[in-house]
Every structure is written in structure tokens, then in C-alpha cells.
Image: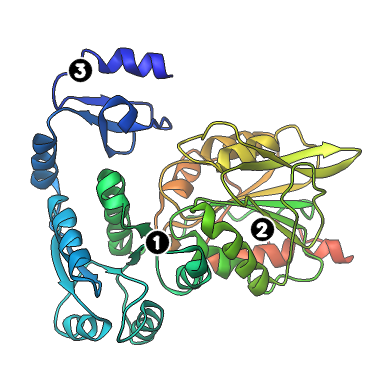
């Protein structure tokens, strides 16, 4: 890959673009490129690239809440260069006063502020009816991770480290635009024709999620029954947040946290996630399912990758269920399509319910699902389809 991309970049004109396949991802800086969008990379004069971004960006309005003067200055500069209409305030109180008389498209929120913490401010504003997306834009230490996960579960749509504004501005811009567009998407009618019901209770449920995933997972896994099958989750999230997220999901679901070592047995009623920079998947040993862990190259730009998890289940002759929830990009789409062809029961979150519709859309448009629904409907599907594990006969047909 390094040789091929280097060969393609060499004759590229200044400020020219390199467009890769939809699922391809490269480390742009290694080739003196700047990522401008999904699989789109630009070369050449940074000022020209910046002007192009400004001229093509929609002037969405962003409110930045941060108590540090230097941070506010940096936020304004970086987001203004991306083409956004930016306002900065220094406290939660100022933010509330501003929002009482102004409309914005997105709020960035620092976690630690003197008058009121980002945690308290967001929960209060959500109760008061704040609907716009909120991104935690902060420098978080390991000790703050549980608080960030709590916010992502209860009301924030994403977390971005401040350093990413300068290290990977194109990715930050893409994330912000996707969140804003998702919030402005008009309600869609539920997709008909995808309300199947599994023939057997699954022995394992594999769930993939990205942007908006912590909140979706919290809702879809709430109060799982004691006879639940094993749950394996691949969530695109910083490694320092993966264990706090898994622990929170265990708290809300009642599932036990499973071991993450390679070869660990996969047990009913347990939840499995990747802790650290590893892919996870499933294998079989001595007639039972075991967890596999790998430090193989990122796939679709991600490690852990949903596709790697789904692909690991190909050829496993056991009742399984695969689920794709909200997220950017297409990670998991190819693997789910293959699983569907093997008879695995496949589920996707509906468009009107997603923070970002990218991952579910990829499989729905390719007719690679058996069930499409909002989080409440998927939760009910779980409860209904798990019942035979407790000796209750499964229903057949549409599940109505």
C-alpha cells in the first residue's frame, strides 16, 4: 500500500486530489497529504486548501464553551478556518444566556469549567430542551474517562481531543458536519419490509457502532434479562475510554464484564469489548466459542474494526445475530453482507433514530439486513428473541 500510494502521489499536481476506494484509508501525513473527506486527500499549498475549504463550507453556527482564553482563541481560529460561524463564551452561564436568544447548529463543550462543570451544564440544558448536537472538546486525562462516558451516554454526541483541531482538521470538520446534518435530517418513515424474526435464539450478539454509539448502546442494552446470550461490541472510541464504556454498559444492562484475553471463553450473560488498540472477534476451540484478539493493521481506518469482528464469524455454524448502530463511514457493511449470505440474522438502526446514518445506511441500501428499527424496537427484538434461552418457545413470522 505504501508503494502504491507513493507512486500515485508523485505526479499529483499542487492542491490536486487523490480519491481512493470508498473503504480505503491511509495515514495522510506520511504522504504529505491532507484528508479533506471520506477517502479524499489533497496535496500542496495549505493556504489554497484552506481557501477551498472556506469557499465550499456551509456557514453553520457553532457555540464554543471553554473557560481558558487561549483555548477559546485557538478554537475560534481553527473552526473559522474550516468555514464555520463561530462564537465563543467562557462559562456555562454565558452559554445558557447566549442560547436563550440565539440559535446555533452545534455546541462544543469543555469538561472542566469553574462556574458549572460541563457534565452538569449539559444535563441541565438537555432537560430544558436543548436539541442541537453537543461535542465534548477537551483534553481528558484517564481519570476523567468515566465522566466523559457518562456524558456520551446521556446527551453528548461525540468527544474530540483539542489537539485534533490542528493534527487532523479535515476529520474534525467531517465529524462536525455529519453531526449537524444528522440533527437536521427530517424524520423519515420507517422502512418497511425489514421486520423479520430469528428462527433460533442467538448464542452471541455482535454489535458495531461509531459516532453516537455510547448513547445508542446504553439504550439498546438496558436491563438485559438474566438469560441473555453473550454480547460482543466493537465501538470506535479512544482506547482510554473503552473499559469505562464497557463498565457503564454492564451497569445499565446487568451483564457481566467478560475477559478480553485472546482465547478467553465467550459465556452467556457476559459483555465483551476490546480494551486498547486491538481488533476482537470470535473463534472456536474444543467445541466452544472463544474471543480472538489481534493487533493486525487497522481496517477501514479503525482498530478495533466492526468488519474484522463480523468477518471472524464467517463459517461459524452457530445461531448468531449481527447489529449495526449509528456511525460514520461503512465499517461493518461488508462483513454484515457476508454474514447475511450465510444466514446470520442481521439488524440495522433506522435512519430517523441515528445520530449519523452512515454505517446502517450502507447495509440497508444493499438489502443486507433482516430487521430495521429504532433503538426501542431493537431492544424489544433482543428481549423477544432471547426468550427461548429460558425455555420459552420462539415466535415465528413477523414478530408482531
Badge 2 density bin: few <14, some 14–19, many ≥20, Cα 10 Å:
few
Sequence-wise first label, 3 or 1:
3
Element class at badge 1: strand
| Quadrant into which the C terminus falls | bottom right
Residue 241 in view (yes/no): yes
Which residue is found at the position 82% from the left and 44% from the top? 289
Calculate the distance from the C-alpha at mark 3 to the C-alpha at mark 2. Answer: 54 Å
Looking at marks 2 and 1 on the same chain, the residue that comes earlier in the sequence is marked by 1
Q: Are marks 3 and 1 in contact (CB under 8 Å)?
A: no
Q: Is residue 330 above or below residue 185?
A: above
For residue 339, the mark is none
What residue is shown at x 26% (from left), y 44% (from top)? 170
Of residues 1 and 307, the one nearer the viewer is 1
Q: Nearer the viewer, mark 3 or mark 2?
A: 3
Question: In this image, 371 relative to 356: left or right?
Answer: right
Does dot 3 land on a helix, a strand or a loop?
loop
Q: Residues within 10 Å of mark 1 (few under 14, many from 20)?
A: many
> For mark 1, what is the residue?
158
Q: How many marks?
A: 3
Residue 12's mark? 3
Residue located at (28% from left, 39% from top): 37
> Label 3 vs label 1: CA separation?
35 Å
Question: Horizontally, is 132 left or right of 263 in the view?
Answer: left
Rate crowding at label 3 as few (under 14), some (14 to 19) or many (20 or more) other CA atoms within 10 Å.
some
> Which numbered disc covers residue 398?
2
The reply to whether residue 400 is visible in this rendering is no
Q: Residue at x 32, y 32 (%)?
A: 28
Q: Are marks 2 and 1 in contact (CB under 8 Å)?
A: no
Screen quadrant of the N terminus: top left
Distance from Cα at disc 2 to Cα at disc 1:
35 Å
Amino acid at each position: 500500500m505504501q508503494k502504491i500510494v507513493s507512486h500515485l502521489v508523485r505526479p499529483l499536481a499542487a492542491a490536486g486530489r487523490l480519491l481512493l476506494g470508498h473503504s480505503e484509508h491511509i495515514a495522510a501525513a506520511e504522504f504529505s497529504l491532507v484528508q479533506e473527506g471520506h477517502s479524499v486527500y489533497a496535496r500542496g499549498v495549505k493556504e489554497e486548501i484552506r481557501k477551498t475549504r472556506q469557499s465550499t463550507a456551509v456557514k453553520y453556527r457553532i457555540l464554543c464553551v471553554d473557560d481558558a482564553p487561549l483555548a477559546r482563541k485557538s478554537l475560534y481560529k481553527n473552526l473559522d478556518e474550516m468555514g464555520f460561524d463561530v462564537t465563543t463564551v467562557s462559562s456555562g452561564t454565558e452559554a445558557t444566556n447566549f442560547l436563550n436568544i440565539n440559535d446555533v447548529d452545534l455546541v462544543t463543550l469543555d469538561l472542566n469549567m469553574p462556574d458549572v462543570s460541563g457534565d452538569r451544564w449539559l444535563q441541565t440544558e438537555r432537560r430544558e430542551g436543548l436539541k442541537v448536537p453537543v461535542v465534548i472538546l477537551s483534553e481528558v486525562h484517564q481519570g476523567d474517562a468515566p465522566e466523559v462516558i457518562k456524558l456520551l451516554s446521556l446527551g453528548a454526541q461525540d468527544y474530540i481531543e483539542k489537539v485534533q483541531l490542528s493534527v487532523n482538521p479535515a476529520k474534525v470538520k467531517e465529524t462536525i458536519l455529519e453531526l449537524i446534518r444528522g440533527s437536521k435530517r427530517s424524520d423519515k418513515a420507517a422502512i418497511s419490509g425489514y421486520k423479520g424474526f430469528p428462527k433460533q435464539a442467538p448464542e452471541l450478539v455482535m454489535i458495531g457502532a461509531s459516532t453516537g454509539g455510547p448513547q445508542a448502546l446504553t439504550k439498546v442494552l438496558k436491563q438485559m434479562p438474566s438469560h441473555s446470550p453473550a454480547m460482543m461490541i466493537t465501538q470506535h472510541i479512544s482506547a482510554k475510554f473503552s473499559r469505562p464504556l464497557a463498565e457503564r454498559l454492564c451497569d445499565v444492562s446487568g451483564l457481566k464484564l467478560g475477559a478480553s484475553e485472546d482465547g478467553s471463553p465467550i459465556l452467556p450473560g457476559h459483555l465483551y469489548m476490546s480494551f486498547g488498540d486491538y481488533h476482537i472477534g470470535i473463534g472456536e476451540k474444543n467445541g466452544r466459542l472463544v474471543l480472538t484478539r489481534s493487533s493486525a493493521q487497522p481496517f477501514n481506518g479503525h482498530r478495533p474494526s466492526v468488519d474484522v469482528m463480523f468477518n471472524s464469524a464467517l463459517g461459524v455454524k452457530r445461531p448468531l445475530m449481527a447489529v449495526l448502530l449509528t456511525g460514520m463511514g461503512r465499517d461493518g457493511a461488508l462483513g454484515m453482507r457476508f454474514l447475511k449470505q450465510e444466514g446470520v440474522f442481521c439488524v440495522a438502526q433506522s435512519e430517523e433514530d441515528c445520530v449519523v446514518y452512515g454505517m446502517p445506511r450502507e447495509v440497508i441500501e444493499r438489502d443486507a439486513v433482516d430487521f430495521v428499527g429504532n433503538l426501542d424496537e431493537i431492544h424489544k427484538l433482543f428481549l423477544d428473541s432471547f426468550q427461548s434461552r429460558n425455555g420459552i418457545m420462539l415466535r415465528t413470522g413477523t414478530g408482531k
